[in-house]
Amino acid sequence: MTLFLDHWVDGVCAAALASVLSVSFAGSVSAVERLTIDLPLLDVNVSLNLKGARTTRELIESNPDLQELDRAGDGSVSRLLGQFLTAPLPQRTSSVLEQSVGHPLLEQALLAASELVKVEGLPADTSGRMLSDALQAAYRDGEPNLLGLLRHVPGESLSIDFQALAFYAKRLRANQDDARTLVQQGTAMAPAPKSLAESGAEGWTRVEIRFPAAHRSQLLDITVLTPQGTSNGKLVVISHGLWDEPDSFEGWGRLLAAHGYTVLLPDHPGSDAKQQKQLLDGASPPPSAEELRFRPLDISVLLDGVEAGTLLTGQQIAIDDVAVVGHSWGATTALQLSGLQTTSRKLKTRCQDPLDLDRNLSWVLQCSWLSGADQGSLADSRVKAAVVVSPPMRLLFDESSGPSLQAKVLLVSGTKDWIVPSDPEAVVPLKGGKPLANGHRLVLASGGSHFNLWAPADQKEAPILGPLILAWINEQLAVPSAHTFSGGGWGHASVPLVDVTGQL
């Protein structure tokens, strides 16, 4: 995920507050006329009259409480409401919502917010149909903003309970507490030598190719990095996250290629940056659950091509001894290829509870995989090592299948990742001697977020995780090198990296 919902904000969630209205359209039901905002911490209840208010000024003039607050704040309320309620929504938002109605991604996003925003007088419905209809009506009536959308929501009254928002914030904090404690109690690895960390700046060649895949209707776009010097005969495949692209992780690939590895960075066409653009243009729905199966198949097809000699022709590659690296959904893909079994069991029992204490933003994506979860066990015996960075995994995988993994897995998670938080998605699956902890390692990046651990091609600084990834693959694929995981020296000066496996 490079994650996934953060990018979706530009489209589905451009409607900000409106995107969380989990109610249904009810034909001729009259529109909401009153918006109530509950601020329990301040013991304040603000009620706004929406009827007839098409501008910020009209809204304030029809609400004495707002008039007083605006005067006391020297016009700050007017400015805030103008930015929030009456700023124009992108025209494409309506098309994006229409494409997303009924899609599991949108349904889960609305379910997650259903405790925050409620509409009296209508049954709950997380399909998104009401939201799409109300937005289209707002555009039709010349009110293409959040205030116009609220004025077209059917029902009796609408309320926003910020106590629920406080609950969500507290839950997110709790979902990161264990990781922070582990980091504080552990010892950060010594930083990698500057010469090693920066060695990926040269020593490789780059080409872009296309390769057929029977399960895809289009050719796969692949970035290929090969060592300029002596090749070690090993292959690494790097899988990008949701709505991302190979370019975001080319820094990892360059470092690996500079040290003798041949690296493939495929573009997953059903969930890449181009698919995101199509979604935001209103030309495509969100990625389907079928992508859960297609992504690992993309990589297995590449391995088949190398093995058959139709890909990387003329190179001597040890195809039975491959490493896969992934970020976010790409990390989930790497776990599938490593042999971890997928299951719908937890998805069926936990996806519908917005108050689940382990719930986090990655569950929006994971729960959208329900229909494909039982077809996602796609181990590839040629994969012997994996580095998985911030994988959404808690609901999808059966931890008891851990002993069946044919690959040794290094799991990396950032302590400030609010999209795929460390505790439920990394610490718990490996904690307490669970089967998934059988020989695998967990490294926590102190201060790491979902988006600062990757390595874009144009990034001037050396990749934070580059030396760690290289060390793990060197060791697991038995490549002769002084730089190994157990040998240390793969840390980072500004983002401490701590192996906490022994503390679990």
Image (spheres, rainbow, N blue to C red):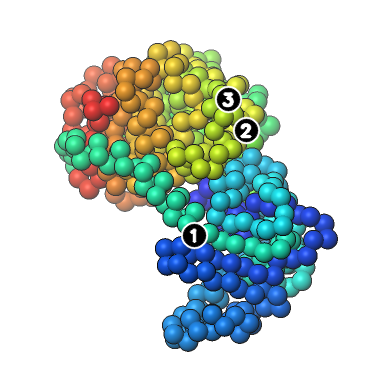
SS for callout 1? helix
Q: Name which of mark 1 and mark 2 comes first in the sequence.
A: 1
Disc 1 to disc 3, C-alpha distance: 33 Å
Does 327 appear above or below 149?
A: above
Residue 291 versus residue 215: which sits nearer the camera? 291
Does 322 appear above or below 347?
A: above
**Percent from the top left, x then y, of residue 412?**
34, 34
Circle 3/circle 2 CB separation < 8 Å: no
Residue 372 versus residue 399: which sits nearer the camera? 399
Q: Quadrant of the C terminus?
A: top left
The residue carrying pointer 2 sits among few (fewer than 14), some (14 to 19) or many (20 or more) residues within 10 Å by Cα, namely many
What residue type is disc 3 on?
A: Ser
The residue carrying pointer 1 sits among few (fewer than 14), some (14 to 19) or many (20 or more) residues within 10 Å by Cα, namely some
What residue type is disc 2 on?
A: Ala
Q: Name which of mark 1 and mark 3 comes first in the sequence.
A: 1
Return the residue at label 1. 162
User: Farthest residue in the front direction?
Assistant: 43
Return the residue at label 2. 289
Quadrant in the picture for residue 134: bottom right
Evaluate whether residue 258 shows in this view.
Answer: no
Could you tell me which residue is drawn at 28 percent across and 16 percent down? 478
The residue carrying pointer 3 sits among few (fewer than 14), some (14 to 19) or many (20 or more) residues within 10 Å by Cα, namely many
Circle nearer the viewer, 1 or 2 = 1
**Percent from the top left, x then y, of residue 188?**
19, 37
Quadrant in the picture for residue 157: bottom right
Return the residue at label 3. 344
Q: Name which of mark 3 and mark 2 comes first in the sequence.
A: 2
SS for callout 2? loop
